[in-house]
Image: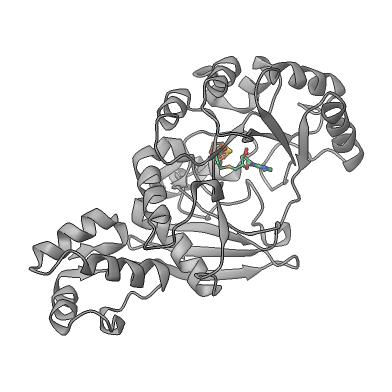
Amino acid sequence: MVDLAGLELKELEDFVESLGHRRFHAKQLYRWIWKRGVTDFAQMTNLGRDLRAALGTAATVSTPEVVRRDVSEDGTQKFVLRMADGRQIESVFIPDTPAQTFCVSTQVGCAMGCAFCLTGRMGLVRNLSAAEITAQVRLLARTLDLLDKSFNIVLMGMGEPLHNYDATMKALRMLNEPVGLALHPKRITLSTVGLVPMMDKLAQEPLMPNLAVSLHAATEETRGAIVPLNRKYSMQDVIDACKRFPLAKRRRIMFEYVMLAGVNDSNEDARKLVKVLAGVKAKVNLLPLNAAAGIPFERPDDARVNEFAKILVDRGLMVSVRKSRGRDIRAACGQLIVEGQGRQSAAQRLAAEL
Ligand code: SAH
Ligand code: SF4
């Protein structure tokens, strides 16, 4: 069985041809799957009976199962999805920000181990395929009746997208496909913790999403303490990669900065951050920590966040403070974790041995 959920249009054309049918039917098929959210070949009424029968025996369209759906007081919705191998991921719908936004995962867990992030606690379980990345969009849009509406996508769910580069890029091409959802790359934001070689590779791509970079500190020392990857690619390496990153007119790189009380939230940090970002077309997005059990940091109070923001604004930076949407359902940034499927904890290992 060929899984059509993971095929780009040109691959689907080859497949349709291999079944002995004309290539143009692939466009109809792609439209059914991606624009209408239909996965049952029997319902694809403009395809001939022969083709539908051939598809029925040779192909499937895999779609994860929604095992849980939580709705926050603020309208944010968190979906827990189970994939074919039983692994689970989370995807989040954030309404009216001002557009509708889907926050999508690229990996089960994450290898990067940032000190304040629950997903990092899981370690990397596995990469998602392009089928699994795009299916989150298809499934959420269909469930929420948004297939015909415009929406944005942020690759800010579980995982580090540039650590699963090929599948992520294929997913972007599939979402961009004009006969499908035709999502413009301007509507997609890729967030990375700073895998410098992959940032340079991204800079060569014909389909360029908006770039967000998780900076989180204004000195190498502080960044090294909370972002382990900083020991491999220093903050300065990341900033240099940003400086050579090609940006369309009026575009900026968004620098995410998780604010941790007493760690990176002083006025001095704010002034250093201004210097670090000098010469970069930047905007700063401050993310006051979303606390969670097992995360050894605290969220600064609003007055601290505002004073920090004011220093940046007074020195000419564009700044926004991210609202923590969906905190009551643990859907906010850094709170995505699917219990019980990460690497075994020492306690679990011990229990298994006994
Ligand atoms: N791996 C990518 C994208 C996913 S994380 C990255 O790190 O950029 C999306 C954003 O949520 C990142 O900026 C991340 O640093 C932030 N984040 C992680 N844990 C958080 C927490 N506990 N509170 C607030 N933001 C957090
Ligand atoms: Fe991975 Fe991003 Fe979490 Fe860091 S913040 S552990 S890179 S998901």
Ligand 2 shown in quarter: top right
Image check: 243 left or right of 257? left
Question: Could you tell me which residue is drawn at 56 percent across and 21 percent down?
Answer: 238
Q: Which image quadrant is residue 250 in? A: top right
Would residue 135 be found to the left or right of residue 12 on screen?
Answer: right
In the image, taking residue 116 as reference, residue 22 lies left or right, namely left
Q: Is residue 226 above or below residue 90?
A: above
| Whole-percent x, y for residue 131 in the image | 35, 57
| Residue, far front | 249
User: Residue shown at 71%/56% (left/top)?
Assistant: 325
67 on left or right of 131: right
Extreme-left residue of the structure: 20
Splitting the image into 4 quarters, where does residue 203 fall? Answer: top left
Question: Where 58 falls versus 248 (above or below)?
Answer: below
Task: Estimate the x, y position of residue 336 in percent, counting from the top left.
Answer: 58, 52
Q: Position of residue 29 (x, y in %)?
A: 28, 70
The quadrant in which the N terminus is found is bottom left
On screen, residue 9 above or below 106 = below
* Color style of the picture: one colour
Which residue is drawn at the image coordinates 59% and 27% (left, top)?
227
Q: Is residue 154 above or below residue 62?
A: above
Q: Is residue 61 visible?
A: no
Camera-side residue: 20 or 69? 20
Residue 9 in percent (x, y) is at 28, 57
- Tell me if residue 178 can be seen: yes
